[in-house]
């Protein structure tokens, strides 16, 4: 009986996310930046690399076609930090959402 209850509890924990996981997901924010000069794979690589070096940036995804980069980050990261990082590459950036 103990084994059955233990198995049931473990399966419920696997199915339902914990409060800590939910809080972490809610704590993230997403920002989309328009980078007009991002026209090739190297540009996208450099933009992604520069943004990922910022403490608090979780992930980035650049789109050459749209010339945008989507950034998942902690709330402590400011739009100004993201824009300044892109300016280091001599590119311009603006927040589109």
Image: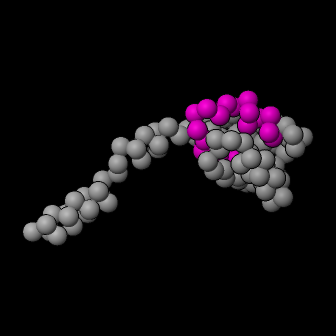
In the foreground, 73 or 34: 73
Judge whether residue 28 can be spotted in this image: yes
**On the picture, is 97 further left or further right than 90?**
left
Residue 37 rendering spot, x and y as whole percentages:
85, 45
Q: Considering depth in this image, is 6 or 26 the residue closer to the camera?
A: 6
Q: In the shown orientation, is residue 36 left or right of residue 7?
A: right
Q: Is residue 48 left or right of residue 4?
A: right
Kindly give the residue lying farthest to the front in the view shown: 2
Region in magenta: 67-86
Q: Residue at x 47, y 43 (%)?
A: 24
In the image, residue 51 lies at what x, y percent?
74, 45
Quadrant of the frame with the N terminus: bottom left
Establish if 38 lies above or below 27.
Answer: below
Q: Residue at x 74, y 47 (%)?
A: 53
- 83 within the magenta span: yes
Residue 69 highlighted magenta (yes or no): yes
- Asked whether residue 66 is in view, the answer is no
Image quarter in which the C terminus is found:
top right
Residue at left offset 85%, top offset 37%: 87
């Amino acid at each position: 009986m103990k084994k059955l209850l233990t198995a049931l509890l473990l399966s419920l924990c696997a199915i339902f996310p914990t409060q800590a996981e939910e809080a972490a997901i809610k704590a993230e924010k997403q920002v989309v930046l328009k980078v007009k000069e991002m026209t090739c794979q190297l540009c996208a690589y450099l933009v992604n690399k520069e943004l990922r070096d910022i403490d608090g940036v979780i992930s980035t995804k650049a789109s050459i076609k749209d010339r945008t980069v989507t950034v998942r980050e902690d709330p402590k990261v400011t739009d100004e930090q993201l824009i300044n990082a892109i300016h280091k590459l001599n590119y311009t950036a603006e927040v589109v959402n």
